[in-house]
Image (cartoon, helix red, strand yellow):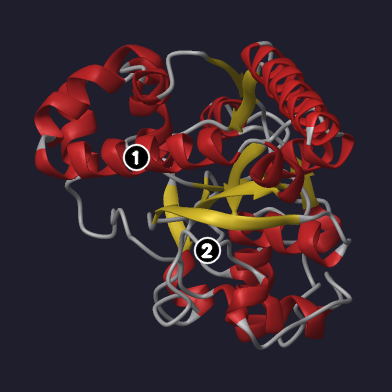
Amino acid sequence: MVALERSIRKVVFVIFILSTIQSWSQRGVKHEVAIAQQFGLGYAPLIVAQERGLIEKRMPTASVKWVQMGSGGAIRDGMAAGTIDIGSMGVPPFLIAWSKGIDVKVFFSICEMPNRLQTNRADIKSLSDFKPGMKIAVPSPGSIQHILLSMGAERQLGNARALDNQIVAMAHPDGVNALINNVDIVGHFTSPPYLFKEIEKPNIHTILDGRDAFGGDYTFLVAIATRKFKEAQPELFKAVFDAFMEAKSWILANPGEAAKLLEKPLGIPASELYVQLTAQGAVFTENPRGMIRFLDFMLQAGYVKKTTKDVRDLIWETLDPSKAN
């Protein structure tokens, strides 16, 4: 009996020591996340979450690193390299990452917003008027603007890749300046607030709307997360999702206040941002739509080599598979 009691005490002591070590180690765990976004009004929920400290509000121990990059392709490369945990981009860049085997899925649908191809040439009325050598700026090959251009080319020219050799990669702010100042490009496929800045100029007009190219409504931007981050830091993963959801709800309920908050980060007067936030076509949606349609087109056109018909292959559990498509 004495020997048994001693054995029990030893077991209890070992369990105590192990639990203490685990507790100490957990105190030393660093809750870190690197979040990448691009340029434009579409990223408003992320900007609001950053400016209002909504992630830190939920997890005060979190260290949040915000990174701004010029294209979804650059963010995709960062996620593949393990330097970015959460990235925001158009649907096509995400689908390219997924098709390449990068272990990421969509966990938050950011927005639907207008995307338009605009030109500074009066003689260009349609895609057929772009002659060889005339350059069209998009953020990067495989960007949502590039794929919408390809969809438009298939509809108007009968060849999805007809204009691929004429695209040049430019971040949206650079594309705006180039188009307005007639430098290097004659077309720019862009989104708010940049398309509104361009169309103010009397020599610039729209020749292709993204919705017409796609053939209906589609999600513009999504936030994606790596499996590694999601499984290693589930609490922080949820904190980020909840923060983004709060930011989106706050924008919808307070567009005037949101415009004021976004004025400095975007460098656009609040009065203009309010008009753009409340304009037709600017929708902050709960679940992504159009992903399978994009994927089908991109497979057919040769931009990806992998496909699925099950949207659950593309989204994390934060989203509703019965409402996403």
Amino acid type, mark 2: Glu
The x and y percentages for residue 207 are 48, 62
Label 2: few (<14), some (14–19) or many (≥20) C-alpha neighbours in 10 Å: few
Can the viewer see residue 273? yes
Q: Give the residue at mark 2.
A: 317
Query: Residue 85 sits in which quadrant?
Result: top right
Q: Is residue 4 left or right of residue 227?
A: right
Residue under circle 1? 196
- What is the C-alpha distance between the residues marked 2 and 1? 36 Å
First-in-chain label (2 vs 1): 1
Question: In which quadrant is the N terminus drawn?
Answer: top right
In this view of the protein, which residue sits in the foreground, 294 or 151? Answer: 294
Q: Residue at x 65, y 58 (%)?
A: 105
Q: Is residue 121 left or right of residue 113?
A: right
Q: What's the residue type where badge 1 is placed?
A: Phe
Is 299 drawn above or below residue 50 in the view shown? below
The answer to whether mark 2 and mark 1 are in CB contact below 8 A is no
Asked if one can make out residue 41 in the rendered structure from this viewpoint, the answer is no
The answer to which of 29 and 88 lies nearer the viewer is 29
For image coordinates 60% across by 47% down, the residue present is 89
Q: In the image, residue 224 lies at what x, y percent? A: 61, 49
Neighbor class of circle 1 (other Cα within 10 Å; few <14, some 14-19, many 20+) is some
Residue 7 place in picture, x, y as percent: 83, 31
Coordinates of residue 75 in the picture (x, y in percent): 73, 37
Residue 3 is tagged as none
Left or right for 77, reference 29: right
26 on left or right of 122: right
**Which sits in the foreground, 138 or 243?**
243
Secondary structure beneath label 2: loop
